Amino acid sequence: MATTRSSTILFRNTMRIADGHLDGFRRAIAQAVAFAQEHGPQLMVDVFIDEERMLAHSFQLYRDSDAIRAHWRLSDPYIREVMEHCTVQHFEIFGAPDHDIVAALRTPDGGSFPFVVSPRLAGFDRLGESGVPFRPEQGC
């Protein structure tokens, strides 16, 4: 089986929300996602929250490394605002970002955090397709 050729990159960011910062985190995330939806290069952004454990999980899908660079240039103030309310517990990169993307993974204050890069093995997407119906009778 050949490795699938695709430039898409998926980020999964697990953040620990600081005690007493849940409301501020919610506001900052809402503003950041609204900005990204309006101006960002991401193909998809989704954020999930586990209030009981004070964790949040952010998923962001990018077309390629250039889109990540554009996101970082545009969104820095929003990223900084979010980071006032949390710390990165773990960061996962799925795909093959350019080396400078991996080297630049730092918190806004320059600190490092744990991350792992997992190259693509196989897959597909339907992001460019429109009107592709899912028919449950066809199965998986």
Image (spheres, rainbow, N blue to C red):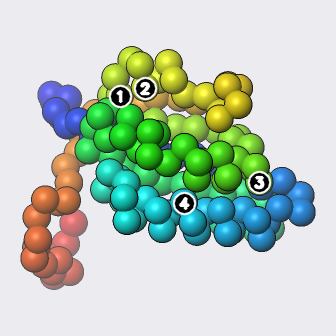
Distance from Cα at disc 1 to Cα at disc 4: 22 Å
Circles 1, 2 touching at the beta carbon (< 8 Å): yes
Q: Residues within 10 Å of mark 3 (few under 14, many from 20)?
A: many
Q: Which amino acid type is shown beneath numbered disc 2?
A: Ile
Where residue 62 appears, as percent x and y from the top left, is: 33, 46
Say which residue label 1 marks: 97
* Quarter where residue 27 is shown: bottom right
Q: Which mark is residue 74?
A: none
Say which residue label 3 marks: 85
Does 23 sit above or below residue 122?
below
On the rendered image, what quadrant is the N terminus found in? Answer: top left
Q: Which of label 4 and label 2 is nearer to you?
A: 4
Residue in front for this viewpoint, 140 or 115? 115
131 horizontally vs 69: left or right: left
Residue in front for this viewpoint, 92 or 1? 92
Q: Residue at x 65, y 33 (%)?
A: 107
Where residue 29 appears, as percent x and y from the top left, is: 61, 62
Where residue 132 appears, as percent x and y from the top left, is: 10, 73
Which is more N-terminal, label 2 or label 4?
A: 4
Say which residue label 2 marks: 101
Does 39 sit above or below residue 116?
below
Circles 4, 2 touching at the beta carbon (< 8 Å): no
